Image (spheres, rainbow, N blue to C red):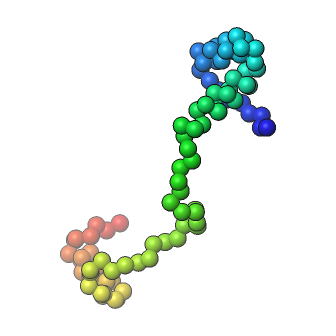
């Protein structure tokens, strides 16, 4: 059994203490029984798949022209010269 601490609002604590006193059980037993009644309403969620280490997505073609890095550099310089790209 695991020992833990929880925070509950005052009114719930008072109600739990009342139940424990009225039914001659410990406060811990009140919380255990409450969780036993509540747990079936929250079944485990189905995971899509086992967690794995994150990886970059595979690159894919988006329909743009196949330009070399040199061609891209030249286009960027032309746009800078035309004032289309803000300079730092």
Instruction: Tell which of 34 and 74 is nearer to you.
Output: 34
Q: Residue furthest left?
A: 82
The vertical placement of 12 against 72, above or below, is above
The image shows residue 52 at horizontal and vertical percentages of: 58, 66
Residue placed at 77% from the left, 37% from the top?
Answer: 2
* Quarter location, residue 84: bottom left
Residue placed at 34% from the left, 89% from the top?
Answer: 68
The image shows residue 86 at horizontal and vertical percentages of: 28, 67
Quadrant, the N terminus: top right
Quadrant, the C terminus: bottom left
Residue placed at 58% from the left, 32% from the top?
Answer: 38
The image shows residue 41 at horizontal and vertical percentages of: 54, 37
* Quarter location, residue 53: bottom right
Is residue 18 shown to the viewer in this render? yes
Instruction: Tell which of 14 and 30 is nearer to you.
Output: 30
Give the mark count.
0
Instruction: Tell which of 62 and 49 is nearer to you.
Output: 49
Is residue 74 shown to the viewer in this render? no
Residue placed at 27% from the left, 70% from the top?
Answer: 85
Q: Is residue 43 left or right of residue 75?
A: right
The vertical placement of 65 against 27, above or below, is below
């Amino acid at each position: 059994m695991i020992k833990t601490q929880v925070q509950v609002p005052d009114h719930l604590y008072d109600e739990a203490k009342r139940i424990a006193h009225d039914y001659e059980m410990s406060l811990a037993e009140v919380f255990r029984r409450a969780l036993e009644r509540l747990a079936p309403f929250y079944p485990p969620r189905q995971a899509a798949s086992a967690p794995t280490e994150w990886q970059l997505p595979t690159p894919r073609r988006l329909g743009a022209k196949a330009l070399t890095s040199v061609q891209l550099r030249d286009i960027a310089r032309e746009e800078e010269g035309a004032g289309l790209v803000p300079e730092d």
